[in-house]
Amino acid sequence: MTSTLPNAESKRPVRHQPILGLRVAGTGLGVPENVVTNEDLISLGCDSEWIIQRTGIASRFHAPANVATSDLATKSAKNAIQSA
Protein backbone atom coordinates (compact mmCIF):
# COMPACT_ATOMS: atom_id res chain seq x y z
CA MET A 1 0.00 0.00 0.00
CA THR A 2 1.42 3.40 -0.93
CA SER A 3 0.74 6.46 1.16
CA THR A 4 0.93 9.99 -0.17
CA LEU A 5 2.76 11.18 2.94
CA PRO A 6 6.44 11.97 2.24
CA ASN A 7 9.24 10.20 4.03
CA ALA A 8 11.21 12.44 6.47
CA GLU A 9 14.49 11.85 4.58
CA SER A 10 13.18 12.06 1.03
CA LYS A 11 10.38 13.37 -1.13
CA ARG A 12 9.41 9.86 -2.25
CA PRO A 13 6.08 8.44 -1.05
CA VAL A 14 6.10 6.11 1.94
CA ARG A 15 5.47 2.52 0.84
CA HIS A 16 3.97 1.35 4.12
CA GLN A 17 1.75 2.65 6.88
CA PRO A 18 2.30 2.03 10.58
CA ILE A 19 0.16 -0.58 12.27
CA LEU A 20 -1.02 0.90 15.55
CA GLY A 21 -1.34 -1.41 18.54
CA LEU A 22 1.08 -4.02 17.18
CA ARG A 23 4.05 -5.19 19.20
CA VAL A 24 6.61 -7.97 19.00
CA ALA A 25 5.99 -10.23 22.00
CA GLY A 26 8.82 -12.69 21.41
CA THR A 27 11.47 -13.78 18.97
CA GLY A 28 12.89 -17.19 18.22
CA LEU A 29 15.80 -18.77 16.43
CA GLY A 30 15.94 -22.11 14.69
CA VAL A 31 19.22 -23.03 13.04
CA PRO A 32 20.87 -26.32 12.14
CA GLU A 33 23.39 -27.71 14.60
CA ASN A 34 26.19 -28.04 12.02
CA VAL A 35 28.34 -24.89 12.04
CA VAL A 36 30.68 -24.39 9.06
CA THR A 37 33.54 -21.99 9.69
CA ASN A 38 35.70 -20.26 7.11
CA GLU A 39 38.54 -22.54 8.17
CA ASP A 40 36.39 -25.49 7.12
CA LEU A 41 36.32 -24.04 3.59
CA ILE A 42 40.12 -23.92 3.17
CA SER A 43 40.01 -27.29 1.37
CA LEU A 44 37.85 -25.60 -1.31
CA GLY A 45 40.53 -22.98 -1.89
CA CYS A 46 38.90 -20.24 0.20
CA ASP A 47 40.92 -17.97 2.47
CA SER A 48 39.28 -17.24 5.83
CA GLU A 49 40.51 -13.64 6.10
CA TRP A 50 39.49 -12.89 2.50
CA ILE A 51 35.92 -14.01 3.26
CA ILE A 52 35.76 -12.00 6.49
CA GLN A 53 37.15 -8.83 4.89
CA ARG A 54 34.67 -8.91 2.00
CA THR A 55 31.54 -10.28 3.67
CA GLY A 56 32.01 -10.11 7.44
CA ILE A 57 31.01 -13.78 7.61
CA ALA A 58 33.07 -15.97 9.94
CA SER A 59 30.74 -18.98 10.05
CA ARG A 60 27.43 -20.24 8.72
CA PHE A 61 25.02 -23.06 9.46
CA HIS A 62 24.53 -26.09 7.22
CA ALA A 63 21.43 -28.24 7.41
CA PRO A 64 21.53 -31.92 6.52
CA ALA A 65 19.47 -33.07 3.54
CA ASN A 66 16.70 -34.44 5.78
CA VAL A 67 16.06 -31.05 7.46
CA ALA A 68 13.60 -28.80 5.62
CA THR A 69 13.20 -25.05 5.93
CA SER A 70 9.83 -25.70 7.56
CA ASP A 71 11.59 -27.71 10.29
CA LEU A 72 13.74 -24.69 11.11
CA ALA A 73 10.72 -22.36 10.93
CA THR A 74 8.80 -24.58 13.36
CA LYS A 75 11.72 -24.55 15.78
CA SER A 76 11.92 -20.73 15.48
CA ALA A 77 8.19 -20.33 16.08
CA LYS A 78 8.27 -22.54 19.18
CA ASN A 79 11.20 -20.54 20.58
CA ALA A 80 9.37 -17.26 19.84
CA ILE A 81 6.26 -18.48 21.67
CA GLN A 82 8.35 -19.53 24.68
CA SER A 83 10.08 -16.12 24.81
CA ALA A 84 6.78 -14.19 24.57
Image (cartoon, rainbow, N blue to C red):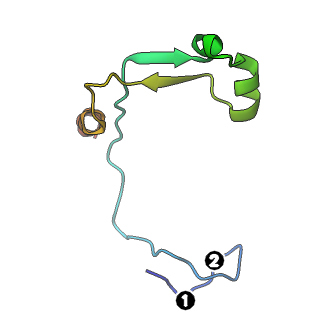
| Left or right: 67 as drawn, with respect to 15 | left
User: Residue 28 in the image: x percent, y percent?
Assistant: 34, 36
Mark identifier at residue 41:
none
Mark identifier at residue 7:
2
Establish if 31 lies above or below 34: below
Q: Residue furthest front?
A: 44
Is label 1 in a helix, a strand or a loop?
loop
Q: Nearer the viewer, residue 76 or 50?
A: 50
Q: Residues within 10 Å of mark 1 (few under 14, many from 20)?
A: few
Q: Residues within 10 Å of mark 2 (few under 14, many from 20)?
A: few
Residue 21 quadrant:
bottom left
User: Residue 12 in the image: x percent, y percent?
Assistant: 65, 81
Q: Nearer the viewer, residue 62 or 45?
A: 45
Is label 2 in a helix, a strand or a loop?
loop
Quarter of the image that includes the C terminus: top left
Q: CA distance from mark 1 to mark 2?
A: 9 Å
Mark identifier at residue 4:
1
Quarter of the image that includes the N terminus: bottom left
| Left or right: 54 as drawn, with respect to 82 | right
| Left or right: 40 as drawn, with respect to 61 | right
Q: Residue at x 45, y 24 (%)?
A: 61
Mark 1 touching mark 2, by CB under 8 A? no
Establish if 18 lies above or below 59: below
The number of numbered badges drawn on the structure is 2
Instruction: Give amino acid for label 1.
Output: Thr
Residue 11 quadrant:
bottom right
Establish if 8 lies above or below 42: below
